[in-house]
Image (cartoon, helix red, strand yellow):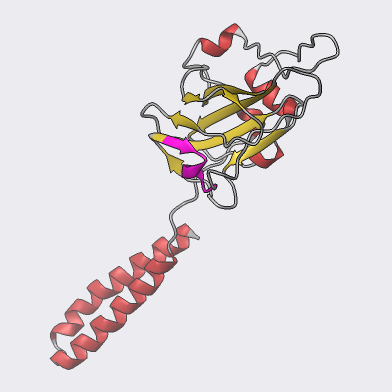
């Protein structure tokens, strides 16, 4: 599509040059009509030229480039039904940002992108949820574990240079495979969420294709 369009534009430009000699011997009114027709054709084709779509990447291709490349900060202890808020800083890097959560039962969900805020390249400091298409009162703390003192949720932020084509299929298994998280640790019969055990290689830096940020919050 792009190659054909390029040729069309080139041919129109060449035609305009070749007609230059003919235009010299034509009345001014005729010259203007010919120029107008050529310009309209060029504009029409130019409108059809779309910028190339960025290349995409699959979840299975993600390799972390350290654990502290992105900064996630916020309140760590919440009460039930209290609105949740935290900040994300890409530390000057630009890319496609994804925000994922994992609760104490192993459920994984995508917070961004979402239907209210489609994916786009980002760089800088942002506040979740207000900068991500969500009402600040719409994301609240919940406590699902029974008999536990506090319930833990882990927030992950990923920054990649290519869109993740299958981000909506992410689950506990694929998430843990990407980041090298160990098995859940249990204390008696009470579930207190997952204990994160990142491999030493996670912090070596400059060896992956995705920058990572992690933030844990608890609901009492």
Q: Is residue 63 visible?
A: no
169, above or below 197, in the image: below
Q: Which residue is nearer to you in this view: 149 or 86?
A: 149
x and y, in percent, of residue 152 in the image: 67, 22
Q: Is residue 72 above or below residue 200?
A: below
Q: Is residue 163 left or right of residue 186?
A: left
Percent position (x, y) of residue 189?
86, 13
Give whichever of 167, 189 is nearer the camera.
189
Q: Based on the displayed image, in which of its 4 quarters is residue 78 positioned?
A: top right
Residue 30 in the image, given as x and y percentages of width and height = 20, 91
State the image coordinates of residue 31 (x, y, percent, origin top left).
Answer: 19, 87
Which residue: 18% across, 84% down? 23
Most foreground residue, 71 or 158: 71
Q: Nearer the viewer, residue 18 or 7?
A: 7
Q: Give the image quarter of residue 32.
A: bottom left
Q: Name above or below for residue 105 compared with residue 10.
A: above
């Amino acid at each position: 599509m792009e190659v054909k369009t390029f040729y069309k534009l080139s041919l129109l430009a060449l035609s305009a040059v070749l007609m230059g000699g003919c235009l010299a011997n034509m009345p001014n009114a005729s010259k203007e009509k010919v120029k107008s027709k050529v310009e309209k054709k060029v504009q029409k084709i130019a409108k059809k030229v779309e910028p190339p779509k960025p290349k995409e990447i699959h979840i299975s291709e993600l390799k972390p480039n350290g654990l502290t490349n992105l900064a996630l900060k916020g309140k760590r202890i919440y009460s039930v039904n209290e609105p949740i808020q935290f900040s994300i800083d890409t530390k000057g890097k630009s890319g496609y940002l994804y925000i994922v959560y994992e609760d104490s039962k192993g459920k994984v969900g995508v917070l961004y992108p979402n239907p209210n805020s489609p994916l786009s390249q980002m760089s800088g400091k942002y506040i979740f949820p207000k900068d991500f298409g969500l009402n600040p009162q719409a994301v609240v703390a919940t406590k699902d574990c029974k008999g536990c003192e506090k319930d833990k949720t882990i927030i992950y932020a990923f920054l990649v240079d290519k869109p993740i084509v299958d981000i909506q299929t992410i689950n506990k298994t694929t998430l843990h495979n990407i980041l090298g998280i160990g098995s859940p640790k249990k204390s008696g019969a009470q579930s207190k969420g997952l204990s994160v055990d990142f491999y030493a290689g996670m912090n070596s830096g400059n060896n992956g294709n995705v920058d990572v940020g992690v933030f844990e919050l608890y609901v009492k």
